[in-house]
Image (cartoon, rainbow, N blue to C red):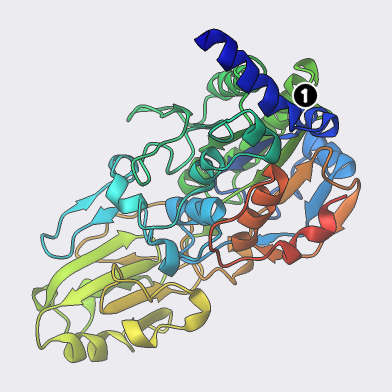
Amino acid sequence: MLLSLGLLFAALSLGRCAPLQLQQASNRSKLLLVSFDGFRWNYDQDVDTPNLDTMAVDGVKAKYMTPAFVTLTSPCHFTLLTGRYLENHGVVHNMWFDTKTGVKLPYYTTQGISSWWDNGSLPIWITAQRQASEFMECLHSQGLKTGSIHFPGTKAKYQGEQVYKKLVEPALFNYSNENNWRQSIDTVMEWFTVEDLDFITLYFGEPDSSGHKYGPESTQRKNMIKQVDRTVGYLRQRIRESGLESNLNLIITSDHGMETVIKTDEIHLRTVSNFTFKDLDFELLDYGPSGLLVPKEGKLEHVYSVLKNAHPKLHVYKKEEFPKRFHYANHSRITPLLLYSDPGYVIHGRYKVQFNKGEHGFDNEAMNMKTIFRAVGPAFKKGLEVEPFESVNVYALLCELLGITPEPHDGSLEATKSMLR
């Protein structure tokens, strides 16, 4: 009797779903968001990139994309996932830090600290999992099925929820290995076809690492772009082989660009006249061109005054006076004093521990911080080059492609609507 009632209920439920809805659901497009960390907007201009070029012919290419500030990996990726500036989503740095205890944790460890990421701004994975399309509501589904491989923010929980399927890299992981890249792509294809996932994010740690170690103009970086291009070719080949070409939208983008580090006339805070680290309760320095300082009680004005004109390439602000265009300082995690330097210059603290030839974290209006945006698939026009836009607008586009209602965000679909069919 119970079985009969269950079958009757299922039949009635399906009965209220029109045949057109059933057809639309079977044709519902999937979405893959790929990020190649540190891919500067013009990296394809000094290297042959036939696969990226073909993707532009088959789909959409932006002249460039402007990342959020501060141009660091975790903050900028979380802007892609939430559509929010850093002062609104709260992931203000790659490193978790506590200004009271002075503890600072590195990038990889910070990936697993949910409280750093879960600040009230839901990443699109969780929103998609909570929302059902009209057809899925007919089937009493809980929402879309999402997955993520190595994407910043993947390891955290948000309001107790996590990504449905995920792979988190180990602490010692070779981000540059091409075989690892292909294995990740094969896993993505399996998740789409065998497990029927709807939305997946996929992260590659290059060309960022090569740009840091060898510099953005180096032969090693150029060779890495060739590897990236081969990988794009392999990805599109696997999409075709998996029968997904007609119902998978593919977006390839990045978090930020890369700048050559200037090794002359460097910024060394320890040599600044009348400045002493004894006047600080907390510092987050030696992380490229930005810094966060908490002066001891009664020392804020002194520290500010001795640092603000200490170097012509160094900019020092009180939190409340930090330029509004950065959408960065208005968050409780931001310290009373903020520092950033002009493109090419990094800020050295107590000791010189930074030796990278390439760096990011600079002003997001600097051209070498701009990054790429490419898209192809059934939702996108062909052979279209669009004007530059801010990365904060990508989230609304992702929601539109998935057919879900966005959470409150700082971007707009208007910025990307012209690229859609």
Q: Is residue 39 above or below residue 323?
A: above
| Residue at 23% from the left image edge and 80% from the top image edge | 272
- Judged left or right of residue 304, residue 248 is right
Q: Is residue 219 above or below residue 298?
A: above
Q: Which residue reaches farthest front?
A: 1
Q: Camera-side residue: 337 or 141? A: 141
Q: Is residue 223 visible?
A: no
Query: Label 1: few (<14), some or many (≥20) within 10 Å?
Result: some
Asked which secondary structure carries label 1, the reply is: loop
Q: Is residue 113 above or below residue 397?
A: above
Picture coordinates of residue 61 (x, y %)?
80, 51
- Judged left or right of residue 373, residue 164 is left
Q: Amino acid at mark 1?
A: Leu
Picture coordinates of residue 362 (x, y %)?
49, 67
Q: Is residue 376 visible?
A: yes
Q: Which residue is mark 1?
A: 244
Q: Camera-side residue: 20 or 117? A: 20
| Residue at 46% from the left image edge and 83% from the top image edge | 323
Picture coordinates of residue 408 (x, y %)?
53, 63
| Residue at 46% from the left image edge and 44% from the top image edge | 213
Q: Is residue 274 above or below residue 151?
A: below
